[in-house]
Amino acid sequence: MNQLNKISKINKKKLYKRIRHTDNYSIYLYSAIYLLIATMAVASYMIWHYYSYGQWAMDVTMQDFMKNFRTPWLTPVFRVITSTGETIPVIIATAVIIIALVIYKKRKEAIMTAVYMLGVWRLNDFLKQLLHRPRIDTSQHLIDISGYSHNSIFSLPSGHSMNFMALILLSLYFVWIFSNNKKFNIGLTLLLLPYATLVGISRVYLNVHYFSDVITGWSVGAVCAAIAVIIHRIICIRQNRYNY
């Protein structure tokens, strides 16, 4: 039995070494796996808690905090930020990314991005229909949501938070594997990740989502991105596409 365990450990080590030697970007594969596990755990816990106990105490705390935090000059700023996470801006951003990938002859990644974002949108609709969490009363909203889809009456998970985070994470992954300019990559990451967070926060500030909706949206968006990265890395390994 001990000998079998030793052989198993040796085979695992050989597999890890093979992946490291054959895939120049194995760090992204491992990072995506860790991200998938962590965010899947967070999203599952948030959904389980809602089913079991209903509203989170932190939702009330965050609403009270935002009520005291609001100012006449800050509200228009958050309205602009939240508008960038709506369907049309996200479609435009997705189209720009797809066109850029096609221009740089990354057609498979361009197709992957299109399929990926369609899947993210459909998943968000499915989860809202499945969970049926009523949105905050419209009389308390600081922005008009009447133009949203039929799922606008449901709030879990936040579509803005989920879709925007999913798009940003996949886009940053492509930037890091295709661009050799580390300063640019770091700068873009430090710009886009906080902005994706702000899009989610804007939903709470404008009182159209509970904070738990936003956290769940971020988590599910990250889960989607992690799965996409894992699939892409496996395809690259299988096709010997190691040097971009």
Image (cartoon, helix red, strand yellow):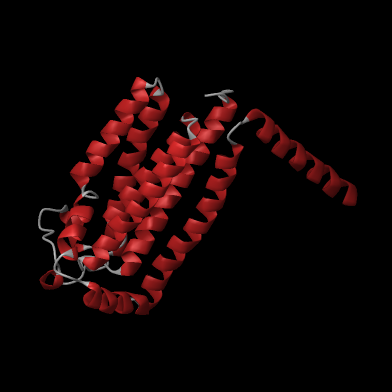
Residue 233 position, x and y percent, is: 54, 34
The answer to whether 231 appears left or right of 79 in the picture is right
Q: Answer yes or no: is residue 41 visible.
A: yes
Camera-nearest residue between 7 and 169: 169
Q: Is residue 119 above or below residue 37?
A: above
Viewer can see residue 155:
no
Residue 64 spot, x, y in % from top left:
26, 79
Q: Give x and y (percent) for residue 26.
A: 60, 37
- Left or right of 67: which side holds 171? right
Q: Which of 48 and 228 is in front in this view?
A: 228
* Residue at 61% over, 31% down: 24
Q: Foreground: 155 or 205?
A: 205
- Across and down, in percent, residue 87 comes to 21, 46
Q: In the rendered image of this protein, does residue 138 appear above or below residue 83? A: below
Direction from residue 88 to residue 182 in the image, left or right: right
Label tally: 0
Task: Look at 15% across and 60% down and name the residue there.
Answer: 76
Which residue is at a point 83% across and 49% down the rendered structure image?
5
Picture layout, residue 116 above or below residue 105:
below
